[in-house]
Amino acid sequence: MNNSKVFFSIFIAAAVGATVGMLFAPEDGTKTRKKIKKSANDWANEALEALEKGKAKVQDTADRVVSKASSFKNDAVDAADEQMDEAKSTVNKMK
């Protein structure tokens, strides 16, 4: 099971547990609804923050992969150029 599924499952379980707890609390309906609304807003904000952090990590990883790939490409081009120069030099010596 990947981390996002575990996080999502824990998040949902906490939300359901808190909502059920508030519904059975001995307060009037208006206060309970306000608490539920505030809790839902808080959870939504926490979820958005977690998504933003995840997005930043993915972007960072993608940037590193692109950088590495570019470096490998440059190394391959340099190696090919060196081989081409050696081949030209060998051909010129044979003439």
Image (cartoon, rainbow, N blue to C red):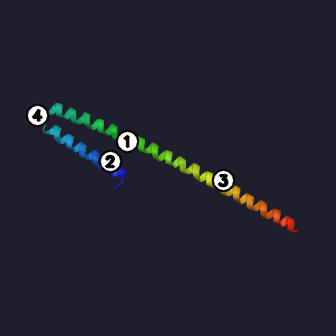
Q: Secondary structure at mark 4?
A: loop
- The residue drawn where x is 37% and y is 41% is 50
Q: Secondary structure at mark 2?
A: helix
Residue named by callout 2: 7
- Distance from Cα at disc 4 to Cα at disc 3: 69 Å
Q: Secondary structure at mark 3?
A: helix
Q: Secondary structure at mark 1?
A: helix
Q: Position of residue 59 (x, y in %)?
A: 49, 45
- Distance from Cα at disc 4 to Cα at disc 2: 31 Å
Task: Indicate the amino acid at tag 4.
Answer: Pro
Number of residues whose C-alpha sits closer than 10 Å to that of mark 4, classed few (under 14), some (14–19) or many (20 or more): few
Q: In the image, is residue 10 above or below residue 39?
A: below
- The residue drawn where x is 29% and y is 35% is 42
- Distance from Cα at disc 1 to Cα at disc 3: 36 Å
Task: Indicate the amino acid at tag 3.
Answer: Asn
**Circle nearer the N terminus (4, 3):** 4
Closer to the observer: label 1 or label 3?
3
**Circle nearer the N terminus (1, 4):** 4
For the view shown, which residue lies furthest in the right direction? 95
Task: Indicate the amino acid at tag 2.
Answer: Phe
Q: Are marks 1 and 4 in contact (CB under 8 Å)?
A: no
Residue named by callout 3: 74
Number of residues whose C-alpha sits closer than 10 Å to that of mark 1, classed few (under 14), some (14–19) or many (20 or more): few
- Distance from Cα at disc 2 to Cα at disc 3: 40 Å
- Distance from Cα at disc 2 to Cα at disc 1: 10 Å
Q: In the image, is residue 67 above or below residue 85?
A: above
Residue named by callout 1: 50
Q: Nearer the viewer, residue 43 or 68?
A: 68
Q: Are marks 2 and 1 in contact (CB under 8 Å)?
A: yes
- The residue drawn where x is 36% and y is 54% is 2
